[in-house]
Image: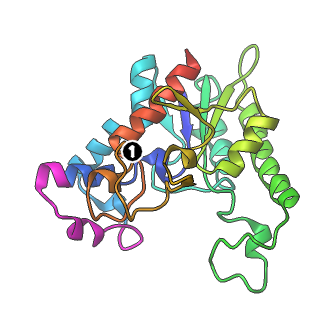
Amino acid sequence: MILFVGCSFTWGAGLQFEYLTKERGWTSDEINAINPPKSNLEHLDYKCDEYRKKHHYPNLVAKEMNMGYVMGKLGNGGTNYEFPKILKYTSTELAGQESIQLVVIQFTDWVRSCPEIEKRQDYDGTDNRDFLSDKHIDDIITQQIKTISTNISKLATGEGGTKWIGWSWKDDLAQVLKTKFPKNYMPLYHKGKEYDSMDELIVVDGNWRFDDSSFQHKDKLRICDVIKGVDDTHLSSTGHKVIANSIIRRLK
């Protein structure tokens, strides 16, 4: 069995909008009106959720590898600080120590719930990281990955224990993962090229623009690329295929 742990990109946020557009003719205005944080996508109906579960990359990987899979978190979202708690729960409750052969970690932005940022007196809820040195950021990211890796090791069964691979949304975390955890690092592959992070998948005029929903990219990797006017940079079904194929390539 494969355990998938990640944030909204792993859960498949935004895929419901593809369904609502294609099957029910919803407009971009109607979709933007329910786009988080305005509402919770978990509240959408059964058919919307079935579309999400069919097209998100965990299901695509499990289907191709002919393996069972389980999600570390049933709901949307996640932080790197939350993942160790999920893994601790998994080791005792979720799937049992004999069930997990592989853990796939999708690392989210290291800033989320970061104590070094949130403990500042001037913290206003934004992800301002400018006051941290490059070394401090490197140390924070390294500790996040180490803590997650340690908790995965507690799932260990059999010779060699439970294996894990990880890929990253943000490039700063990807560089730490690539250099300090090379056996676990997983690049992304798209159109014959290798990418260190999801950030790098969309470049316009030499700048990374994955998180910018103000334009539509020809590769249609994001929801905003397939539904004009929707303010959502989560992965489209095409984007989920890119992630799934990258994982499958790494496993095979």
Q: Nearer the viewer, residue 24 or 224?
A: 224
Give amino acid for label 1: Leu
Name the residue rendered at 74%, 36% in the picture.
Answer: 178
Q: Is residue 93 above or below residue 193?
A: below
Q: Nearer the viewer, residue 159 or 137?
A: 137
Q: Is residue 98 magenta?
A: no
Name the residue rendered at 39%, 53% in the picture.
Answer: 13
Residue 56 visible in the snapshot: no
**Residue 28 image point, x, y percent:** 23, 65
Mark 1 packing: few (<14 Cα in 10 Å), some, or many (20+)?
many
Name the residue rendered at 40%, 41% in the picture.
Answer: 239
**Residue 133 image point, x, y percent:** 85, 64
Quadrant in which the C terminus appears: top right
Is residue 166 rendered to the left or right of residue 18?
A: right
Q: Secondary structure at mark 1?
A: loop
Q: Which residue is mark 1?
A: 221
Q: How is the image coloured?
A: rainbow
Residue that lies at the very extreme toward the front in this rendered image: 205
**Residue 121 image point, x, y percent:** 78, 85
Q: Is residue 48 above or below residue 101?
A: below
Is residue 127 rendered to the left or right of residue 218?
A: right
Is residue 189 rendered to the left or right of residue 60?
A: right
In the picture, residue 160 is in which quadrant? top right
Residue that lies at the very extreme toward the bottom in this rendered image: 122
Residue 237 visible in the snapshot: yes
Q: Give the residues in magenta.
A: 21-39
Q: Is residue 38 magenta?
A: yes
**Residue 233 image point, x, y percent:** 42, 57
Looking at the rendered structure, the number of numbered marks drawn on it comes to 1
In the picture, residue 63 is in which quadrant? top left
In the picture, residue 219 is in which quadrant? top left
